Image: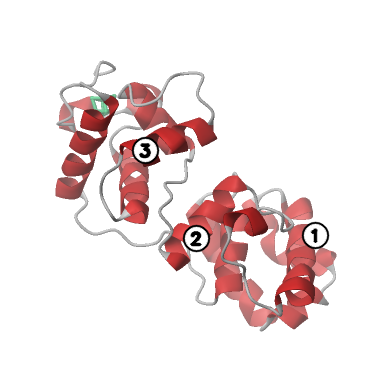
C-alpha cells in the first residue's frame, strides 16, 4: 500500500469508530485557547481543563494576565507541570499580544511561532482548531500510530510526520482527522503492550500483536 492509501484507510476506519470529535481543550476566547494549548505541552488535556477555568476567572482579560506576577499564575497552574516556565510564558505572551497585535492572536503560523511559549505544534493546533487551518499537528499518539502503520518512519521528526500526513490526506477536515488519530492512540493503539489489536480493523498494520 502507498502512504496515501494507508492514510485513506486510516481516515475511513477512524470515521467509522469516531464519527464526531470535539476539541479536547477548553478556551472560549482566542487568547484563552492559545494559553490552554501552551499549557498542554507535556501535560494531559484533562489536567489543563482543570486549571484554565480557575486561571481565567482570576484573570478576566489579557490586560490582567499581562500585569500578573508569574508566581501568582504558577500557584494556579502548577499541577499541569513545567509551571515555572509556563507561568512566565503566559505573562510574556499576554504582554506581546497587547503590544504587537492590539490584543488579538495573529493568524499566521510564522507569527504565532514567535510568541513566547508557542512552538510549531502549538501554533498549528491553534490555527486548525480556531481558524480552520489545514494542519495535522503531531503529538505522541500520532507519532506512535503513524509509525506502527508505516505512514511515518522511526526516525521521522514530528514536523516530518506532519508534512507526510498533510501531503497524503485528501480530506477537508484536518482537525477532525488529528483528533481521531489521537482518540485512536488513547483508546486502542496505546503504547507498548496495552494496545488492543484485537479490536482494530486496520489489517494492513505490520505491528499487529
Ligand atoms: S493493529 Fe494494533 S498496532 Fe496496528 S494500528 Fe491497530 S491497534 Fe495499532
Residue indicated by mark 2: 127
Compare residues 18 and 48 and report the one nearer the observer: 18
SS class of the residue under badge 1?
helix
Disc on res. 167: 3
Disc nearer the start of the sequence (3/2)? 2
- Foreground mark, 2 or 1, reads 2
Snapshot quadrant of residue 94: bottom right
Mark 3 CB near ligand 1 (8 Å cut): no
SS class of the residue under badge 2?
helix
- Marks 3 and 2, Cα distance to the nearest angstrom? 18 Å
- Marks 2 and 1, Cα distance to the nearest angstrom? 23 Å
- Image quadrant containing the N terminus: top left
Disc nearer the start of the sequence (2/1)? 1
Question: Which residue occupies 23% across, 59% down?
Answer: 20
- Image quadrant containing the C terminus: top left
Q: Quick one: label 3, few (<14), some, or many (20+) residues within 10 Å?
A: few
Disc on res. 88: 1
Is 102 rendered above or below residue 135?
A: below
Is 1 rendered above or below residue 10?
A: above
Labelled pair 2, 1 in contact (Cβ < 8 Å): no
Labelled pair 3, 1 in contact (Cβ < 8 Å): no
Q: Splitting the image into four quadrants, where does ligand 1 fall?
A: top left
Disc nearer the start of the sequence (3/1)? 1
Q: Quick one: label 1, few (<14), some, or many (20+) residues within 10 Å?
A: some
Residue 201 seen in this snapshot: yes
Snapshot quadrant of residue 92: bottom right
How did the renderer colour the structure?
Answer: secondary structure
Q: Quick one: label 2, few (<14), some, or many (20+) residues within 10 Å?
A: many
Q: Is residue 139 left or right of residue 91?
A: left
Residue 40 seen in this snapshot: no
Amino acid at each position: 500500500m502507498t502512504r496515501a492509501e494507508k492514510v485513506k484507510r486510516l481516515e475511513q476506519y477512524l470515521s467509522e469508530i469516531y464519527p464526531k470529535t470535539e476539541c479536547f481543550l477548553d478556551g472560549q476566547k482566542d487568547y484563552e485557547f492559545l494559553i490552554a494549548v501552551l499549557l498542554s505541552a507535556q501535560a494531559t488535556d484533562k489536567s489543563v481543563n482543570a486549571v484554565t477555568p480557575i486561571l481565567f476567572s482570576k484573570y478576566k482579560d489579557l490586560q490582567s494576565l499581562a500585569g500578573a506576577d508569574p508566581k501568582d499564575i504558577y500557584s494556579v497552574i502548577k499541577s499541569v507541570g513545567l509551571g515555572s516556565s509556563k507561568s512566565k510564558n503566559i505573562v510574556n505572551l499576554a504582554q506581546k499580544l497587547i503590544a504587537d497585535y492590539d490584543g488579538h492572536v495573529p493568524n499566521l503560523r510564522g507569527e504565532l511561532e514567535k510568541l513566547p511559549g508557542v512552538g510549531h505544534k502549538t501554533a498549528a493546533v491553534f490555527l486548525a482548531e480556531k481558524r480552520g487551518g489545514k494542519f495535522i499537528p503531531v503529538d505522541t499518539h500520532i507519532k506512535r500510530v503513524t509509525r506502527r502503520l508505516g505512514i511515518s518512519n522511526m526516525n521521522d521528526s514530528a514536523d516530518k510526520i506532519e508534512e507526510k500526513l498533510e501531503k497524503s490526506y485528501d480530506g477537508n477536515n484536518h482537525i477532525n482527522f488529528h483528533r481521531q488519530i489521537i482518540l485512536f492512540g488513547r483508546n486502542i493503539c496505546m503504547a507498548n503492550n496495552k494496545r488492543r489489536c484485537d479490536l482494530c480493523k486496520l489489517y494492513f498494520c505490520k505491528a499487529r500483536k
